[in-house]
Image (cartoon, rainbow, N blue to C red):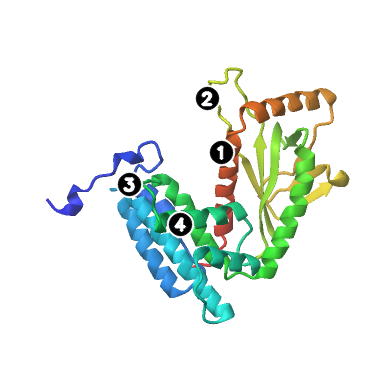
Amino acid sequence: MSMAASLERDDRWDGLGIDSPGDMESIIGRIKFVPQVSEDVVKRFERVKSVLRFSYFDYDLSDVALDYSLLTLELGIKKRFQEIEGDPEERGLSQLIHWGSRRNLFEPDANRLESLTQLRDVTAHPGRYSLMGYLAYDPIIYIVSLINDMYEDAGLRRERRRIVRNVNRSLHGIVEHGAVMKSADASIGIFLARLLQVENRVHPEIYHFAFWPVFNIPADKAAPINEGKPIVITTTDFKLQDGGARLVVEGVSHAPITVEKFRDASDIGWFDAWLATFEQDVRPEVLTIEGELSRISYLLYTQTLPER
């Protein structure tokens, strides 16, 4: 029997959504680069893809792929430094990321950038054995996005940042004491509304919104909580009305959707009580919610990247 024939899926993938080689390929397919990225970087990520394919049979190889991705990120930033500044001085990953941030080369996410330098330190100077396994995939995909970011028009990034900041300031005001999202056939109470991405590399601009419905919080604190999923809507047209108290999303493939503050005192009271319970008892779920929004945001961002 050949080695290939004897390979079997590592059962540590059970329950993680990696049930077939095709599931692994769906993750690997998210590793793609814009044409300007150095060929050296692209070739190294071909090795990352190979390691990821074999991690289907050996779960531990997920960490090997992450380690190699972190090393390649350092190479990628050095390449970009050389293109912009000339021959790079001896700089570590933390210094290179700081340089790229000052140059407005990355989509802003200070916490995630800091987490990469910490991961790199652990890789270079391990104090004990550790295994990230499936958790390695998110930072690998994030590293890919950082490398692509360095070759985008910084002016477009600044404009996106301005639009997202201003719109989300208004959306926060709308949902602060609860809001209702109305479509042609439904009305849903929501506690979160956010503009995730603006795609201004195309015309007309495309806007991706996420709305998270209020979910049930069981009285029994030991009971499992199902926080649900956000409703994601993509459009080329929206308006903030009533001094920013009402959002109207004109649909690309749907009738207009409105999001507006709760007006009735009883609705506001009900929501404030729900929010107090959420803040007190369900705060850890915020990590799940923010993680899901981050994942969706990145997927939306990569959909329009020009491929090599």
* Helix, strand or loop status at disc 4: helix
Q: Which residue is mark 3?
A: 59
Task: Tell which circle, 1 or 4, labels the residue nearer the N-terminal end.
Answer: 4
Using the image as rendered, state which of residue 130 and residue 303 is in the foreground: 130
Q: CA distance from mark 2 to mark 4?
A: 36 Å
Q: Are marks 1 and 2 in contact (CB under 8 Å)?
A: no
* Residue 202 on image: x %, y %: 65, 65
Task: Tell which circle, 1 or 2, labels the residue nearer the N-terminal end.
Answer: 2
Front disc: 2 or 4: 4
Front disc: 4 or 3: 4
Task: Tell which circle, 4 or 3, labels the residue nearer the N-terminal end.
Answer: 3
Q: Is residue 14 visible?
A: yes
* Residue 288: assigned label: 1
Q: Three-letter amino acid code at disc 2?
A: Pro
User: For the view shown, which residue lies furthest in the bottom direction?
Assistant: 86
* Residue 224: assigned label: 2
Q: CA distance from mark 1 to mark 4?
A: 26 Å
Task: Tell which circle, 2 or 3, labels the residue nearer the N-terminal end.
Answer: 3
* Helix, strand or loop status at disc 2: loop
Q: CA distance from mark 3 to mark 1?
A: 23 Å
Q: Are marks 2 and 3 in contact (CB under 8 Å)?
A: no
Q: Three-letter amino acid code at disc 4?
A: Asp
* Residue 231: assigned label: none
